[in-house]
Amino acid sequence: MKKILVLLMILTLSIPYTVKANTSSASSYILMDDTTSRVLVGKDIHSKRLIASITKIMTATLAIESGKLDEMVVVTDDILKAYGSGIYIEVGEEILLRDLVYGLMLRSGNDAATMIAVFVGGSEEEFINMMNKKANEIGMKDTIFNNPSGLPTPEGNYSSVYDMALLTRYAMQYNDYREIVKTKKYKVTTNKKTYLWDNKNKLLRYDYITGGKTGYTEESGRTLVSTASIDDMNLIVVTIRDSDDWNTHLDLYNYAKENYIGYRVLNKSKFRVYGDKYYQKDKLYISKDIYIPLKKEESRSLVSHIILEKKKDYNSNDKVGRNQIFLGDKLLYEEDIYIIKNKSINKKNIFNKIREWFSD
């Protein structure tokens, strides 16, 4: 299929001076742009470390992807082997899978993790296989899961801050996930009792924080994942083995705010394609505005390209190409391009068909 490549523009902007973030307490940390998965700053981002309860981000993701959130779960004696932090459900209790995920993410319930694994995977062993398969699909090359909770075991759950940022970015595509992790309080009533859960993520007291997950074991130290929306930037921070993780996350978000600007690289209301003759009678569009964090010196190397497919048959709202954003020679982002057919052309085609029918 022949394609058209059109160079659009080089974008420029002004950015404030650079400041450093205080991250001295963290063994590993990362600040990632959620839109592009670009690493803005980090330390030992691919080092494999024990991750404790931030494991539960994967458990929650698979529960959401199962499509069973509103199904009732009857708690089995599988939970009896869970220990540590819990929501303290009982054998025989009936609770929605959705509510188990809330208990998993707000209270870090290890009993909830076990029950989710058994319900979604059929067994904990099969669910662990699902976790590792999904990690591979996402591109988590430094990760191995051996349980759904993050509890210490001889094998352990290992990952890197980079991989956990990729997982968080993947999970944040789901509305259910975003809604759960930003919730500060949640009330649940089952056939046996009523629960009122507070979220352990203290960062939610800040308006710009949109979610995250806490973790701790003696073996792993403190682990923490958080997400934020600041000045048109969607950001992810992950720290592993950090005794002052709350402040590290705040410092990294402050670093992003002081050194980057959320620059609108694609504007859906002003989207135009110049130099294209194939679709010139139709309207091409993108579905949303795109913002990317950029520094001043980087803006001079930012370039946008359009790639269009020459389709003989197409309908309105079909995908016909993509808009690529490059920083130098590195592809940062791609956005799909769609089409709205010119109605006058459609009417002309109808009249031609009628004329052809009468002439036969």
Image (spheres, grey):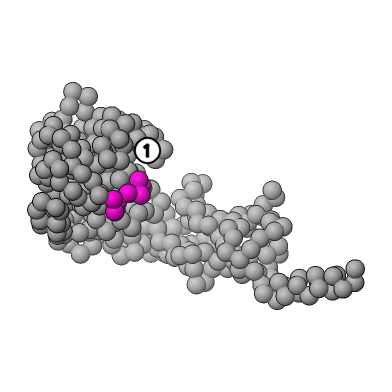
Along the viewing direction, whichever of 231 and 115 lies nearer the viewer:
115
Along the viewing direction, whichever of 70 and 82 lies nearer the viewer:
70
- Tell me what residue is drawn at x 15 percent, y 56 percent: 188
**Residue 49 seen:** no
Secondary structure of residue under mark 1: helix
Residue 94's x, y, as percent? 18, 48
Residue 332's x, y, as percent? 45, 50
Residue 6 quadrant: bottom right
- Tell me what residue is drawn at x 69 percent, y 56 percent: 310
Residue 227's x, y, as percent? 26, 54
Residue 249's x, y, as percent? 19, 51
Q: Residue furthest right?
A: 360
Residue on which the image places disc 1: 134
Along the viewing direction, whichever of 2 and 114 lies nearer the viewer:
114
Q: Is residue 80 above or below residue 316?
A: above
**Residue 78 seen:** yes
Q: Is residue 67 magenta?
A: yes
Q: Residue furthest top?
A: 154
Q: Please indicate whether residue 69 sits to the left or right of residue 325 in the image.
A: left
Q: Residues within 10 Å of mark 1 (few under 14, many from 20)?
A: some
Along the viewing direction, whichever of 20 and 154 lies nearer the viewer:
154
Tell me how many marks there are: 1
Quarter of the figure with the C terminus: bottom right
- Tell me what residue is drawn at x 57 percent, y 64 percent: 317
Magenta highlight: main SS: loop
Q: Which residues are magenta?
A: 65-71
Q: Is residue 262 magenta?
A: no
- Tell me what residue is drawn at x 76 percent, y 71 percent: 349
| Residue type highlighted by circle 1 | Lys
